[in-house]
Amino acid sequence: MKKRRLSILSIIILFFFINALPLEVFAEKVVEINDKNIQIVRQEVTEQSLTNEPIELYGPYAEAQFYYELHSNVTAKDQYLQLEVAKSELLIDPSSITIKVDEEPIYSTTLAGESTNIIKVPLVGAALLEGSHTITVSFDGFVKEGICVPQYTTGNWMSIQPNSYLHIDALPNNSEDMALYDYPRFYIGSLENQVSVITPQNPSMETLQSAYIIANFLSNQSIENTVTVVQEQEVKKMLGNSIVVGGTEEFKTSWVKQLIQDEIANVKEDSLYLSQIQLKQNNQAARALVVLAKKPENILHNTDLLTSSQYYEQFSGDVIQVSELPKPIEGDANEQEITFKEIGMPNIQLDSQHTKTETYYYSLPMETGAIQNPTMELKFKRSATIHSNKETLKDKEEVALAEIELIVNINDVPYPVDVRSLEEDENGNIKALIPIDPATLKDKPLMTLQIETSGLRMDQSCVALDQNRWIQLFNDSKLIFPTSGNGEKSDMYFNNFPYPFSNKAEELTIVLPEQGISSKDMLSLFNVLTTNNRLPEIKLKQTSEIKEEDLKNGNIIFIGSLAEHDLLIAMKDDLLVNYKENVPQLSAHGFLQTEVNYYGFMQSNPWNQSYSMLVLDNLNDSNQYYTRDFLSYLQYSENNSSIAVQTGPDQFFTNTQQLEKTNLDSMEEKKENSDKRNILYWSIGFGVLIIAMFLLIIYYMKRRKKFHPDNKLKR
């Protein structure tokens, strides 16, 4: 959990913004669920996992931090932290692990010999008070005995395993106090308590799209598959809190009508209405967030209220009614400049104990092939113990100690900076501009970023040093990715997916088959289209209501193909895949037709070549047009492919080889044509040369005859 610091200016702006928000606050509601066909079944959440992957710590000293938040004081007994650790068998005394809560040591134990791999640490006192808390796990490792023995070896390590957890009886979701400021915290799903976004039985496209947008936002804050979209008649069990989304006249089931009957009278025209309601049934209770409007389009136009922290962090009370969202106070976004803060990196201090950051991931908001002359602007401070002038150093040992690098790894390609050689400004700040090789970014829309240092550690085993050399890296450092402005659109392949469909600057129309698709599959598509917690501007349409004009204004995704969409039939001659009697002829592209379950192809938009089109369909006679795994494969594929298929679990194939052969054949054809042209040019040139030589011979023969002595005597 990240700590946020607000400046005085931010507080003033936030105060103004809250007062500018047109809202009304009402009283808290409690509704009894009397429908016997619906059960509230909830489990108390008492355990919070610390990590979903091993965290490795390398000696002689390293530490890891974890965060938790309590919304009230905890008085119950038997609260604890449990760590499962793995360790090197080479560790000897005095190797140890120390646990601190809010920088106060509460537990230490040895790691040498046959010590246990399960460490249980009781939590008491200040660790159980309301507020945010930090757990620090510190590792001191020794693998060699003796004085002046360096301990930096690859065998000096321990790791914190994924089974480690925090056991507290008052983790989020257990508070009885209800208020909208708890959103979205109480609507983030967990394995024990799954969140349901509930729509009407026959929702309008606006309601359905609103539900997917809200569910997509919450699922990105949650563990996978813990937020679902369901229709009202499908609800049998409430395993957690719920969000009810729809127009006031859209719901048909008695239990939802009972839930919203007292709210409908308060919903105003052209307004979005949010109501926090407590649901009770016997000894069970759950929360419901009701999202209503008289016109479903008013929900769709205001979904930012529930998906943008700029708005929902201002919530208070249990009911809010908004007639119009204020304009965002953020400045014009420049997608060509990406700050480290946008990537998720805080201000970081690197020193002898913390020599590298974690790896951060960021989906580039532009086509990587269009990036020209990329650069990186680093902003940082350094400690005064880092020498800035090599000439003032006395000997080679001091020179060696002064060699310090700051290394930025972009897609695992290192870009080093000599920290010692850079000059500070009058405030002690340093700015470095580093060029980036465009090949580092090409065909890799998901960028990785990690910062590490070399030379901060002062490894002099026999010299007691209390110097702490450090580098403070600021998160307003940025990556600058200028893109070509010639307006030309290159061929788009799946190695760029979900771009360009995730492009925030371009409209995206998703065309559904008339029978619709499952909510789970639709939510999977929204998840994949979300980059850096943002969705593009989406229009969700059924094929019966779509017009040709609607397809000319942006990118398109068709769910289903010719059998479901008449508009595609009219364009079948322009499609990348040939169809015969509405069946794709995938064998022509190198695939075994009978083995294909799902397929997709990507090409330019036939209604407007400036945009792109994606078609997703199946060949297995089911109502499922793609799988989550298929979308994930397309998302992380590095192949230059335009057609992909899934034949079974974890079995995916593309037309990469065919494209490479086509490109090779094209190159050979161009070479052959070039050779033919060269032969023609040489033949013409040789012919011209022969003619010129013939004419010169005739000219000289005539000239010689004219000036021959016999001819002179005759004249």
Image (tube, rainbow, N blue to C red):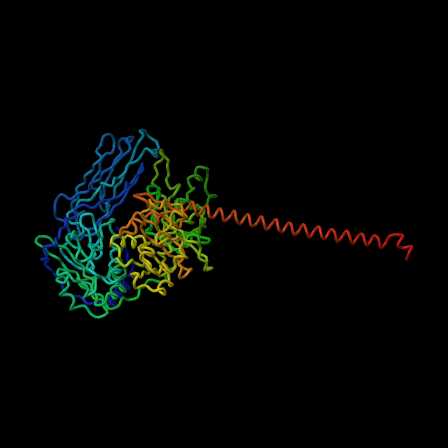
- Give the residue displayed 18% in from the left and 39% down from the top: 120
Q: Position of residue 261 (x, y in %)?
A: 13, 65
Q: Position of residue 316 (x, y in %)?
A: 19, 62
Depth check, front residue: 346 or 219: 219
Q: In the rendered image of this protein, does residue 266 appear above or below residue 483?
A: below
Depth check, front residue: 662 or 353: 662
For the image, the number of numbered tags is 0
Depth check, front residue: 416 or 86: 86
Q: In the rendered image of this protein, does residue 444 appear above or below residue 271?
A: above
Q: Is residue 401 left or right of residue 687?
A: left
Q: Is residue 260 left or right of residue 642?
A: left
Q: Position of residue 648 (x, y in %)?
A: 30, 44
**Outermost right residue:** 713
**Outermost top residue:** 146
Would residue 583 be seen by someone viewing this image from the given angle?
yes
Q: Position of residue 629 (x, y in %)?
A: 30, 47
